[in-house]
Image (tube, rainbow, N blue to C red):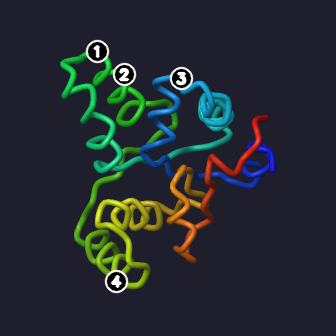
Amino acid sequence: MRMSERLQTATRLFLDTASVIYFVEKHPHFADLVRVAFDRLDEGSLSAVTSPVTLSECLVLPYRIGRPDAAQAFIDVIVYGDNVTFAPIDQAAAERAAELRTRYNMSLPDAFQAAVAMAAGCDAFLTNDATFKRVAEINVIVLGEMEPG
């Protein structure tokens, strides 16, 4: 299925870590796929949600290799991007994450991602991690299963 078709009915999209990394780093295989979502964000026909988990995971490599400019590029997209909401992890999200982790045998960071997406009212979840497809409560779009356009 084409990316544009999967996003056609989405109005609020959760951006998992891989989708942001592919966009910022212009990944040779996935950049065209994530560009479809980011173009919709730019034009205002789609809004997105990110979390502290996304930010932390994206910043590890830039900090490790001493690239504050790369770290800032991620911060600009995740925290200050057009039509992007940086959602906190509050008590309700922490409790929901524990439930999801138990029900779906997920890692805690993944459970936090799903819990924040649900709490923020996202109707789609953009990732390249097929394990999220176990979560019945969210519409998961796996980049590796999409065609460009």
**Residue under label 4:** 102
Residue ID for mark 3: 26
Residue 76 located left or right of residue 2: left
Q: Quadrant of the C terminus?
A: top right
In what element is the residue under mark 3? Answer: loop
* CB contact under 8 Å: marks 1 and 2: yes
- Residue wearing tag 1: 69
The label number, if any, that marks residue 73 in the structure image: 2
Residue 23 higher or lower than 94, as above or below: above
The amino acid beneath tag 1 is Asp
Q: Position of residue 67 (x, y in %)?
A: 24, 17
Are circles 2 and 4 on residues that touch, CB within 8 Å?
Answer: no
> Horizontally, is 85 left or right of 62 in the view?
right
Local crowd size for mark 3, using a 10 Å CA cut-off: few (<14), some (14–19), many (≥20): some
Label 3 is placed on what type of residue? Lys
Label 2 – label 4 distance at C-alpha: 34 Å
Q: Quadrant of residue 114?
A: bottom left
Residue at the spot 37% in from the left edge and 62% down from the top edge: 110
